[in-house]
Amino acid sequence: MKFGGSSLADAERIEHVAQLIKSQIAIGNRPAAVICSAMGKTTNNLLNAGDFALEGRVNVDALRTLHHTTIKEFDLGQHVADDITELLNELENMLNGVKLLQELSPRSLDMLVSFGERMSIRIMAARLNQIGVPAEAYDSWTIGMITTSEFGDARVLPSSMEKIKNTFSNKIDPNTVAIVTGFIGHTESGKITTLGRGGSDLTATTIGAACSLDEIQVWKDVDGIMSCDPRMVRSAVPISRVSFEEAAELAYFGAKVLHPIAMMPAMEAQIPVRVKNSYNPSHPGTVINKDRDNENLVTAITCKRDIQLIDITSTRMLGAYGFLSKVFNTFEKHKLSVDVLASSEVSVSLTLDKKSSVYKGHPLCDDLGDIANIDVKEGKAIITLITDIKRSSEVLATVFKVFMEKGIEVEMLSQGASKVNISFIVSDSLVESAIHSLHMCFFEEQCEITMPTNDKEV
Ligand SMILES: Nc1ncnc2c1ncn2[C@@H]1O[C@H](COP(=O)(O)OP(=O)(O)O)[C@@H](O)[C@H]1O
Ligand SMILES: N[C@@H](CC(=O)OP(=O)(O)O)C(=O)O
Protein backbone atom coordinates (compact mmCIF):
# COMPACT_ATOMS: atom_id res chain seq x y z
CA MET A 1 0.00 0.00 0.00
CA LYS A 2 1.38 3.39 -0.98
CA PHE A 3 0.01 6.60 0.52
CA GLY A 4 0.80 9.90 -1.16
CA GLY A 5 1.27 13.30 0.45
CA SER A 6 -2.39 14.13 -0.13
CA SER A 7 -3.36 11.17 2.09
CA LEU A 8 -0.89 12.17 4.82
CA ALA A 9 -1.46 15.90 5.00
CA ASP A 10 -1.92 16.21 8.79
CA ALA A 11 -2.60 14.23 11.98
CA GLU A 12 -6.23 13.66 11.03
CA ARG A 13 -5.29 12.18 7.65
CA ILE A 14 -2.48 10.06 9.16
CA GLU A 15 -4.96 8.72 11.72
CA HIS A 16 -7.38 7.88 8.92
CA VAL A 17 -4.65 5.97 7.03
CA ALA A 18 -3.47 4.16 10.20
CA GLN A 19 -7.04 3.01 10.90
CA LEU A 20 -7.43 1.98 7.26
CA ILE A 21 -4.31 -0.22 7.49
CA LYS A 22 -5.56 -1.69 10.79
CA SER A 23 -8.97 -2.49 9.32
CA GLN A 24 -7.37 -4.15 6.27
CA ILE A 25 -5.26 -6.34 8.56
CA ALA A 26 -8.39 -7.22 10.54
CA ILE A 27 -10.01 -8.64 7.39
CA GLY A 28 -6.89 -10.57 6.40
CA ASN A 29 -5.38 -8.07 3.93
CA ARG A 30 -2.10 -7.44 5.71
CA PRO A 31 0.11 -5.22 3.54
CA ALA A 32 3.65 -6.54 3.04
CA ALA A 33 4.81 -2.93 3.11
CA VAL A 34 3.39 0.55 3.44
CA ILE A 35 5.16 3.17 1.35
CA CYS A 36 4.78 6.75 2.52
CA SER A 37 5.39 10.05 0.76
CA ALA A 38 6.19 13.19 2.70
CA MET A 39 3.32 14.83 4.58
CA GLY A 40 1.16 17.13 2.43
CA LYS A 41 3.23 19.72 0.59
CA THR A 42 6.43 19.01 2.55
CA THR A 43 8.55 18.27 -0.55
CA ASN A 44 7.60 21.64 -2.10
CA ASN A 45 8.27 23.35 1.23
CA LEU A 46 11.72 21.75 1.44
CA LEU A 47 12.52 22.93 -2.09
CA ASN A 48 11.37 26.44 -1.14
CA ALA A 49 13.52 26.29 2.00
CA GLY A 50 16.50 25.51 -0.25
CA ASP A 51 15.76 28.57 -2.42
CA PHE A 52 15.40 30.76 0.66
CA ALA A 53 18.73 29.48 2.01
CA LEU A 54 20.38 30.53 -1.25
CA GLU A 55 18.91 33.98 -0.64
CA GLY A 56 20.40 33.98 2.87
CA ARG A 57 17.35 32.97 4.92
CA VAL A 58 17.18 29.70 6.86
CA ASN A 59 13.80 28.88 8.31
CA VAL A 60 12.35 25.46 9.05
CA ASP A 61 9.65 26.66 11.47
CA ALA A 62 6.70 25.57 9.32
CA LEU A 63 8.19 22.08 8.91
CA ARG A 64 8.93 21.85 12.66
CA THR A 65 5.38 22.91 13.48
CA LEU A 66 3.72 20.45 11.08
CA HIS A 67 5.69 17.42 12.28
CA HIS A 68 5.80 18.24 16.00
CA THR A 69 2.11 19.18 16.10
CA THR A 70 1.31 15.80 14.59
CA ILE A 71 3.49 14.03 17.17
CA LYS A 72 1.83 15.99 19.99
CA GLU A 73 -1.68 15.32 18.72
CA PHE A 74 -0.99 11.59 18.90
CA ASP A 75 1.07 11.92 22.06
CA LEU A 76 3.73 9.71 20.44
CA GLY A 77 6.25 10.32 23.20
CA GLN A 78 9.73 11.72 23.64
CA HIS A 79 11.55 9.05 21.68
CA VAL A 80 9.70 9.87 18.43
CA ALA A 81 9.89 13.61 19.10
CA ASP A 82 13.67 13.28 19.56
CA ASP A 83 14.06 11.33 16.31
CA ILE A 84 12.19 14.02 14.38
CA THR A 85 14.05 16.85 16.13
CA GLU A 86 17.33 15.21 15.16
CA LEU A 87 16.26 15.11 11.50
CA LEU A 88 15.00 18.71 11.59
CA ASN A 89 18.27 19.87 13.18
CA GLU A 90 20.23 18.03 10.50
CA LEU A 91 18.04 19.75 7.89
CA GLU A 92 18.65 23.16 9.46
CA ASN A 93 22.41 22.55 9.53
CA MET A 94 22.32 21.58 5.93
CA LEU A 95 20.41 24.76 4.99
CA ASN A 96 22.96 26.84 6.91
CA GLY A 97 25.61 25.15 4.79
CA VAL A 98 23.68 26.07 1.64
CA LYS A 99 23.42 29.67 2.84
CA LEU A 100 27.15 29.84 3.53
CA LEU A 101 28.34 28.08 0.40
CA GLN A 102 25.69 29.62 -1.87
CA GLU A 103 25.49 26.29 -3.63
CA LEU A 104 22.66 23.79 -4.01
CA SER A 105 23.66 21.03 -6.41
CA PRO A 106 21.26 18.31 -7.62
CA ARG A 107 22.97 15.99 -5.11
CA SER A 108 22.33 18.41 -2.24
CA LEU A 109 18.74 18.94 -3.42
CA ASP A 110 18.08 15.19 -3.16
CA MET A 111 19.51 15.15 0.35
CA LEU A 112 17.35 18.19 1.18
CA VAL A 113 14.01 16.75 0.02
CA SER A 114 14.73 13.33 1.57
CA PHE A 115 13.91 14.72 5.01
CA GLY A 116 10.17 14.77 4.19
CA GLU A 117 9.81 11.01 3.69
CA ARG A 118 12.31 10.23 6.47
CA MET A 119 10.08 12.08 8.92
CA SER A 120 6.70 10.84 7.71
CA ILE A 121 7.57 7.12 7.99
CA ARG A 122 8.70 7.51 11.57
CA ILE A 123 5.46 9.20 12.55
CA MET A 124 3.31 6.66 10.69
CA ALA A 125 5.13 3.66 12.22
CA ALA A 126 4.84 5.16 15.71
CA ARG A 127 1.11 5.78 15.32
CA LEU A 128 0.50 2.24 14.05
CA ASN A 129 2.36 0.76 17.02
CA GLN A 130 0.30 2.98 19.31
CA ILE A 131 -2.98 1.60 17.94
CA GLY A 132 -1.78 -1.99 18.24
CA VAL A 133 -0.37 -2.65 14.75
CA PRO A 134 3.28 -3.71 15.04
CA ALA A 135 5.19 -1.55 12.54
CA GLU A 136 8.76 -0.51 11.85
CA ALA A 137 10.07 2.47 9.85
CA TYR A 138 12.69 1.80 7.16
CA ASP A 139 14.65 4.28 5.05
CA SER A 140 14.37 2.61 1.64
CA TRP A 141 18.12 1.95 1.27
CA THR A 142 18.05 -0.20 4.40
CA ILE A 143 15.69 -2.60 2.60
CA GLY A 144 17.80 -2.59 -0.61
CA MET A 145 16.57 0.34 -2.76
CA ILE A 146 19.77 1.21 -4.64
CA THR A 147 19.71 3.60 -7.59
CA THR A 148 21.82 5.20 -10.29
CA SER A 149 23.44 8.52 -9.41
CA GLU A 150 21.25 10.68 -11.69
CA PHE A 151 20.34 13.00 -8.84
CA GLY A 152 16.78 14.28 -9.10
CA ASP A 153 15.75 11.55 -11.52
CA ALA A 154 17.54 8.37 -10.47
CA ARG A 155 16.67 4.91 -11.78
CA VAL A 156 16.33 1.87 -9.55
CA LEU A 157 19.22 -0.54 -10.18
CA PRO A 158 18.06 -4.03 -11.23
CA SER A 159 20.17 -5.51 -8.40
CA SER A 160 17.76 -3.85 -5.94
CA MET A 161 15.08 -6.41 -6.77
CA GLU A 162 17.03 -9.32 -5.29
CA LYS A 163 18.14 -7.23 -2.30
CA ILE A 164 14.57 -6.13 -1.53
CA LYS A 165 13.25 -9.68 -1.92
CA ASN A 166 15.89 -11.00 0.47
CA THR A 167 15.15 -8.30 3.03
CA PHE A 168 11.45 -9.08 3.03
CA SER A 169 12.03 -12.87 3.07
CA ASN A 170 14.75 -12.97 5.70
CA LYS A 171 14.95 -9.79 7.74
CA ILE A 172 11.46 -8.33 8.18
CA ASP A 173 9.15 -10.05 10.65
CA PRO A 174 6.01 -10.88 8.61
CA ASN A 175 3.87 -9.83 11.60
CA THR A 176 5.38 -6.35 11.52
CA VAL A 177 4.32 -3.87 8.85
CA ALA A 178 7.35 -2.31 7.16
CA ILE A 179 6.78 1.43 6.70
CA VAL A 180 9.16 2.48 3.92
CA THR A 181 10.17 5.88 2.55
CA GLY A 182 8.86 6.43 -0.97
CA PHE A 183 10.69 8.61 -3.52
CA ILE A 184 14.23 8.27 -2.14
CA GLY A 185 17.08 5.79 -2.50
CA HIS A 186 20.84 5.48 -2.21
CA THR A 187 23.58 5.18 -4.80
CA GLU A 188 25.90 2.22 -4.41
CA SER A 189 28.29 4.56 -2.60
CA GLY A 190 25.60 5.65 -0.14
CA LYS A 191 24.56 9.07 -1.50
CA ILE A 192 20.86 9.92 -1.17
CA THR A 193 18.97 10.11 -4.49
CA THR A 194 15.36 10.77 -5.55
CA LEU A 195 13.29 9.05 -8.23
CA GLY A 196 11.75 12.24 -9.67
CA ARG A 197 8.66 14.08 -8.41
CA GLY A 198 5.87 11.68 -7.53
CA GLY A 199 8.46 8.89 -7.30
CA SER A 200 6.86 7.12 -4.33
CA ASP A 201 4.57 5.34 -6.80
CA LEU A 202 7.71 3.84 -8.33
CA THR A 203 9.00 2.76 -4.90
CA ALA A 204 5.71 0.95 -4.36
CA THR A 205 5.70 -0.87 -7.69
CA THR A 206 9.38 -1.79 -7.29
CA ILE A 207 8.80 -3.36 -3.88
CA GLY A 208 5.59 -5.03 -5.06
CA ALA A 209 7.38 -6.52 -8.05
CA ALA A 210 10.47 -7.56 -6.05
CA CYS A 211 8.27 -9.43 -3.57
CA SER A 212 5.88 -10.83 -6.25
CA LEU A 213 2.84 -9.52 -4.38
CA ASP A 214 -0.76 -10.11 -5.50
CA GLU A 215 -1.61 -6.42 -5.88
CA ILE A 216 0.04 -3.01 -5.51
CA GLN A 217 -2.28 -0.36 -4.11
CA VAL A 218 -1.60 3.31 -4.70
CA TRP A 219 -3.80 5.42 -2.43
CA LYS A 220 -4.57 8.99 -3.54
CA ASP A 221 -7.21 11.66 -2.97
CA VAL A 222 -9.29 10.72 -6.05
CA ASP A 223 -11.46 7.71 -6.92
CA GLY A 224 -8.77 6.28 -9.20
CA ILE A 225 -7.57 7.38 -12.61
CA MET A 226 -10.15 9.78 -14.00
CA SER A 227 -11.19 10.51 -17.56
CA CYS A 228 -9.42 13.88 -17.23
CA ASP A 229 -7.65 15.93 -14.55
CA PRO A 230 -10.53 16.61 -12.14
CA ARG A 231 -9.03 20.02 -11.34
CA MET A 232 -9.53 20.98 -14.96
CA VAL A 233 -12.79 19.17 -15.73
CA ARG A 234 -15.09 18.88 -12.72
CA SER A 235 -17.28 16.31 -14.44
CA ALA A 236 -14.32 13.90 -14.90
CA VAL A 237 -15.32 10.32 -14.14
CA PRO A 238 -13.25 7.46 -12.66
CA ILE A 239 -12.11 4.75 -15.04
CA SER A 240 -12.52 1.23 -13.69
CA ARG A 241 -9.84 -0.55 -15.75
CA VAL A 242 -6.86 0.52 -17.85
CA SER A 243 -3.86 -1.30 -19.27
CA PHE A 244 -0.30 -0.74 -18.01
CA GLU A 245 0.56 0.86 -21.33
CA GLU A 246 -2.39 3.26 -21.14
CA ALA A 247 -1.56 4.25 -17.56
CA ALA A 248 2.09 4.83 -18.46
CA GLU A 249 1.22 6.99 -21.49
CA LEU A 250 -1.33 8.94 -19.47
CA ALA A 251 1.27 9.69 -16.81
CA TYR A 252 3.96 10.53 -19.34
CA PHE A 253 1.66 12.89 -21.22
CA GLY A 254 0.80 14.97 -18.20
CA ALA A 255 -1.67 13.23 -15.85
CA LYS A 256 -0.20 14.01 -12.45
CA VAL A 257 -1.94 11.04 -10.87
CA LEU A 258 0.92 8.52 -11.42
CA HIS A 259 4.68 8.66 -11.83
CA PRO A 260 5.50 8.07 -15.54
CA ILE A 261 7.71 5.04 -15.10
CA ALA A 262 5.97 3.58 -12.05
CA MET A 263 4.14 1.09 -14.26
CA MET A 264 7.32 -0.59 -15.50
CA PRO A 265 8.14 -2.90 -12.57
CA ALA A 266 4.48 -3.93 -12.22
CA MET A 267 4.18 -4.49 -15.96
CA GLU A 268 7.29 -6.68 -16.05
CA ALA A 269 6.14 -8.70 -13.05
CA GLN A 270 2.50 -8.74 -14.30
CA ILE A 271 1.18 -7.50 -10.97
CA PRO A 272 -2.03 -5.45 -11.04
CA VAL A 273 -1.86 -1.92 -9.64
CA ARG A 274 -4.99 -0.50 -8.03
CA VAL A 275 -5.39 3.27 -7.64
CA LYS A 276 -7.66 3.98 -4.66
CA ASN A 277 -9.00 6.94 -2.76
CA SER A 278 -7.98 7.17 0.89
CA TYR A 279 -10.81 9.68 1.38
CA ASN A 280 -13.34 7.18 -0.05
CA PRO A 281 -11.90 3.70 0.64
CA SER A 282 -15.03 1.74 -0.28
CA HIS A 283 -14.75 2.92 -3.91
CA PRO A 284 -13.09 0.17 -5.99
CA GLY A 285 -10.81 2.68 -7.76
CA THR A 286 -8.97 1.86 -10.98
CA VAL A 287 -7.30 -1.46 -11.70
CA ILE A 288 -4.29 -1.26 -13.99
CA ASN A 289 -3.64 -4.59 -15.62
CA LYS A 290 -2.21 -6.30 -18.68
CA ASP A 291 -5.00 -5.77 -21.17
CA ARG A 292 -7.19 -2.88 -22.20
CA ASP A 293 -10.70 -3.70 -21.06
CA ASN A 294 -12.65 -0.63 -21.98
CA GLU A 295 -15.60 -0.26 -24.31
CA ASN A 296 -15.23 3.51 -24.52
CA LEU A 297 -13.78 5.00 -27.66
CA VAL A 298 -11.46 7.12 -25.52
CA THR A 299 -10.11 5.98 -22.14
CA ALA A 300 -8.86 9.37 -20.91
CA ILE A 301 -7.73 12.82 -21.99
CA THR A 302 -4.64 14.56 -20.71
CA CYS A 303 -2.42 17.49 -21.58
CA LYS A 304 1.07 18.90 -21.14
CA ARG A 305 0.98 22.68 -21.06
CA ASP A 306 3.31 25.48 -21.99
CA ILE A 307 5.68 23.47 -24.12
CA GLN A 308 7.82 24.38 -27.14
CA LEU A 309 7.21 23.26 -30.69
CA ILE A 310 10.38 23.16 -32.78
CA ASP A 311 10.29 23.09 -36.58
CA ILE A 312 13.54 21.91 -38.15
CA THR A 313 13.62 22.32 -41.92
CA SER A 314 16.50 20.88 -43.92
CA THR A 315 18.44 23.32 -46.07
CA ARG A 316 19.88 20.39 -48.01
CA MET A 317 18.42 19.07 -51.22
CA LEU A 318 15.32 16.90 -51.08
CA GLY A 319 16.30 13.27 -50.67
CA ALA A 320 19.70 13.93 -49.09
CA TYR A 321 20.34 11.17 -46.59
CA GLY A 322 21.54 11.53 -43.02
CA PHE A 323 19.26 14.46 -42.13
CA LEU A 324 17.23 12.69 -39.44
CA SER A 325 20.29 10.99 -38.06
CA LYS A 326 22.09 14.32 -37.68
CA VAL A 327 19.02 15.86 -36.03
CA PHE A 328 18.66 13.08 -33.46
CA ASN A 329 22.37 12.82 -32.74
CA THR A 330 22.35 16.53 -31.98
CA PHE A 331 19.40 16.16 -29.59
CA GLU A 332 21.24 13.29 -27.90
CA LYS A 333 24.41 15.39 -27.63
CA HIS A 334 22.49 18.15 -25.83
CA LYS A 335 20.53 15.65 -23.69
CA LEU A 336 17.23 17.04 -24.97
CA SER A 337 14.32 14.64 -24.69
CA VAL A 338 11.59 14.72 -27.33
CA ASP A 339 7.91 14.06 -26.54
CA VAL A 340 5.95 14.20 -29.80
CA LEU A 341 7.30 14.15 -33.32
CA ALA A 342 6.14 14.38 -36.93
CA SER A 343 8.43 14.32 -39.92
CA SER A 344 8.44 14.78 -43.68
CA GLU A 345 11.17 14.29 -46.26
CA VAL A 346 12.76 17.66 -45.48
CA SER A 347 11.47 18.73 -42.10
CA VAL A 348 10.88 17.54 -38.56
CA SER A 349 8.50 19.11 -36.06
CA LEU A 350 8.84 18.07 -32.46
CA THR A 351 8.00 19.07 -28.94
CA LEU A 352 10.47 18.97 -26.10
CA ASP A 353 9.97 17.42 -22.72
CA LYS A 354 8.98 20.15 -20.26
CA LYS A 355 12.27 19.93 -18.38
CA SER A 356 14.19 20.89 -21.54
CA SER A 357 14.10 24.15 -23.43
CA VAL A 358 15.71 25.62 -26.49
CA TYR A 359 16.11 29.32 -27.34
CA LYS A 360 17.50 31.31 -30.23
CA GLY A 361 21.27 30.90 -30.04
CA HIS A 362 21.01 27.63 -28.05
CA PRO A 363 23.98 25.35 -28.90
CA LEU A 364 21.51 22.93 -30.53
CA CYS A 365 20.57 25.62 -33.07
CA ASP A 366 24.28 26.28 -33.75
CA ASP A 367 24.97 22.57 -34.24
CA LEU A 368 22.05 22.09 -36.63
CA GLY A 369 22.53 25.48 -38.32
CA ASP A 370 24.63 24.14 -41.20
CA ILE A 371 21.95 21.69 -42.35
CA ALA A 372 18.63 23.19 -41.23
CA ASN A 373 16.59 26.25 -40.33
CA ILE A 374 15.22 26.10 -36.80
CA ASP A 375 12.01 27.79 -35.71
CA VAL A 376 11.15 27.62 -31.98
CA LYS A 377 7.49 28.30 -31.14
CA GLU A 378 6.52 28.95 -27.53
CA GLY A 379 3.17 28.67 -25.72
CA LYS A 380 2.02 25.36 -27.15
CA ALA A 381 0.30 22.42 -25.49
CA ILE A 382 0.01 18.71 -26.18
CA ILE A 383 -3.47 17.24 -25.84
CA THR A 384 -3.30 13.45 -25.67
CA LEU A 385 -6.17 11.05 -26.05
CA ILE A 386 -5.60 7.58 -24.64
CA THR A 387 -7.49 5.37 -27.01
CA ASP A 388 -7.37 2.18 -29.00
CA ILE A 389 -5.76 3.47 -32.17
CA LYS A 390 -7.34 0.65 -34.17
CA ARG A 391 -10.36 2.96 -33.97
CA SER A 392 -8.37 6.06 -34.86
CA SER A 393 -10.65 7.11 -37.73
CA GLU A 394 -13.61 7.34 -35.36
CA VAL A 395 -11.54 9.25 -32.83
CA LEU A 396 -10.04 11.64 -35.35
CA ALA A 397 -13.41 12.30 -37.03
CA THR A 398 -14.88 13.27 -33.67
CA VAL A 399 -11.92 15.34 -32.51
CA PHE A 400 -11.76 17.35 -35.72
CA LYS A 401 -15.52 17.93 -35.66
CA VAL A 402 -15.17 19.35 -32.14
CA PHE A 403 -12.08 21.40 -33.04
CA MET A 404 -13.77 22.80 -36.15
CA GLU A 405 -16.81 23.87 -34.17
CA LYS A 406 -14.58 25.55 -31.57
CA GLY A 407 -12.20 27.12 -34.08
CA ILE A 408 -9.20 25.21 -32.70
CA GLU A 409 -6.30 24.79 -35.11
CA VAL A 410 -4.12 21.70 -34.78
CA GLU A 411 -0.48 22.62 -35.38
CA MET A 412 0.84 19.08 -35.35
CA LEU A 413 -0.59 15.61 -34.97
CA SER A 414 1.06 12.39 -33.97
CA GLN A 415 -0.50 8.97 -34.10
CA GLY A 416 0.78 5.48 -34.43
CA ALA A 417 4.13 5.26 -32.70
CA SER A 418 2.25 4.26 -29.59
CA LYS A 419 -0.70 1.91 -29.93
CA VAL A 420 -2.65 3.75 -27.28
CA ASN A 421 -2.32 7.45 -27.84
CA ILE A 422 -3.07 10.19 -30.33
CA SER A 423 -1.54 13.60 -29.60
CA PHE A 424 -2.49 17.02 -30.93
CA ILE A 425 -0.38 20.16 -30.58
CA VAL A 426 -2.49 23.29 -30.15
CA SER A 427 -1.97 26.79 -28.81
CA ASP A 428 -1.77 26.67 -25.00
CA SER A 429 -4.43 29.38 -24.73
CA LEU A 430 -6.98 27.02 -26.31
CA VAL A 431 -6.30 23.97 -24.15
CA GLU A 432 -9.06 24.41 -21.61
CA SER A 433 -11.75 25.01 -24.19
CA ALA A 434 -10.48 22.09 -26.29
CA ILE A 435 -10.37 19.66 -23.37
CA HIS A 436 -13.77 20.64 -22.00
CA SER A 437 -15.36 20.17 -25.41
CA LEU A 438 -13.62 16.84 -26.00
CA HIS A 439 -14.61 15.61 -22.56
CA MET A 440 -18.24 16.55 -23.12
CA CYS A 441 -18.16 14.74 -26.40
CA PHE A 442 -16.41 11.53 -25.38
CA PHE A 443 -17.59 11.16 -21.78
CA GLU A 444 -20.79 13.18 -21.31
CA GLU A 445 -22.65 12.16 -24.43
CA GLN A 446 -23.01 15.76 -25.38
CA CYS A 447 -22.09 15.66 -28.99
CA GLU A 448 -23.43 13.90 -31.93
CA ILE A 449 -20.96 11.50 -33.48
CA THR A 450 -22.26 10.54 -36.88
CA MET A 451 -20.44 7.48 -38.02
CA PRO A 452 -20.53 6.51 -41.67
CA THR A 453 -22.61 3.42 -42.49
CA ASN A 454 -21.40 0.84 -44.99
CA ASP A 455 -23.60 2.03 -47.83
CA LYS A 456 -22.52 5.66 -47.51
CA GLU A 457 -19.35 7.08 -48.88
CA VAL A 458 -16.84 8.09 -46.18
N1 LIG B 1 -6.44 11.75 -15.00
C1 LIG B 1 -6.34 11.98 -13.67
N2 LIG B 1 -6.96 11.14 -12.81
C2 LIG B 1 -6.89 11.33 -11.49
N3 LIG B 1 -6.22 12.35 -10.92
C3 LIG B 1 -5.59 13.21 -11.72
C4 LIG B 1 -5.61 13.07 -13.13
N4 LIG B 1 -4.87 14.08 -13.67
C5 LIG B 1 -4.40 14.79 -12.65
N5 LIG B 1 -4.83 14.30 -11.46
C6 LIG B 1 -4.51 14.85 -10.15
O1 LIG B 1 -3.65 13.96 -9.45
C7 LIG B 1 -3.90 14.11 -8.06
C8 LIG B 1 -3.40 12.88 -7.33
O2 LIG B 1 -2.01 12.75 -7.52
P1 LIG B 1 -1.00 13.25 -6.39
O3 LIG B 1 -1.41 14.61 -5.89
O4 LIG B 1 0.38 13.06 -6.87
O5 LIG B 1 -1.38 12.23 -5.27
P2 LIG B 1 -0.51 11.74 -4.09
O6 LIG B 1 0.24 12.91 -3.54
O7 LIG B 1 -1.53 11.24 -3.14
O8 LIG B 1 0.37 10.67 -4.63
C9 LIG B 1 -5.38 14.29 -7.97
O9 LIG B 1 -5.72 15.03 -6.83
C10 LIG B 1 -5.74 15.00 -9.25
O10 LIG B 1 -5.96 16.37 -9.01
N1 LIG C 1 7.12 13.59 -1.86
C1 LIG C 1 7.55 13.41 -3.22
C2 LIG C 1 7.29 12.01 -3.73
C3 LIG C 1 5.88 11.63 -4.01
O1 LIG C 1 5.64 10.61 -4.64
O2 LIG C 1 4.91 12.39 -3.53
P1 LIG C 1 3.30 12.14 -3.79
O3 LIG C 1 3.05 10.68 -3.56
O4 LIG C 1 2.63 13.00 -2.76
O5 LIG C 1 2.97 12.54 -5.19
C4 LIG C 1 6.96 14.48 -4.14
O6 LIG C 1 6.23 15.33 -3.67
O7 LIG C 1 7.26 14.48 -5.31
Image (spheres, rainbow, N blue to C red):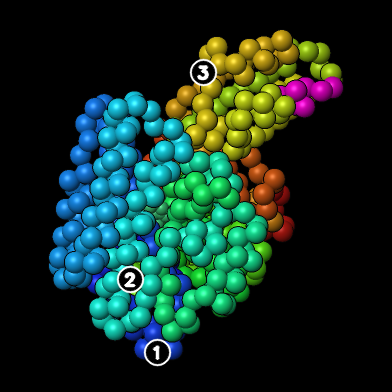
Circle 1 sits on which residue? 27
Magenta segment = 321-327
Query: Does any atom of ligand 1 lie closer than 8 Å to the CB of label 1?
Result: no
Query: Is residue 127 shown left or right of residue 62?
Result: right
The quarter in which the N terminus is drawn is bottom left
Question: What's the CA distance linking mark 1 and mark 3?
Answer: 58 Å
Looking at the image, tell me whether mark 1 or mark 3 is earlier in sequence order: 1
Front disc: 2 or 1: 2
> Percent position (x, y) of residue 229?
40, 52
Tell me the chief SS of the magenta region: helix
Question: What's the CA distance linking mark 2 and mark 1?
Answer: 20 Å
Q: Is residue 236 above or below residue 210?
A: above
Residue in the picture at 60% in, 60% down: 160
Q: State the residue in front, 200 or 350.
A: 200
- Amino acid at the residue labelled 1: Ile
Circle 2 sits on which residue? 125
Q: Residues within 10 Å of mark 3 (few under 14, many from 20)?
A: few
Label 2 with label 1: CB-CB less than 8 Å: no
Asked if residue 396 shows in the view, the reply is: no
- Amino acid at the residue labelled 3: Tyr
Q: Residues within 10 Å of mark 2 (few under 14, many from 20)?
A: many
Label 1 with label 3: CB-CB less than 8 Å: no
Circle 3 sits on which residue? 359
Looking at the image, tell me whether mark 2 or mark 3 is earlier in sequence order: 2
Q: Residues within 10 Å of mark 1 (few under 14, many from 20)?
A: few
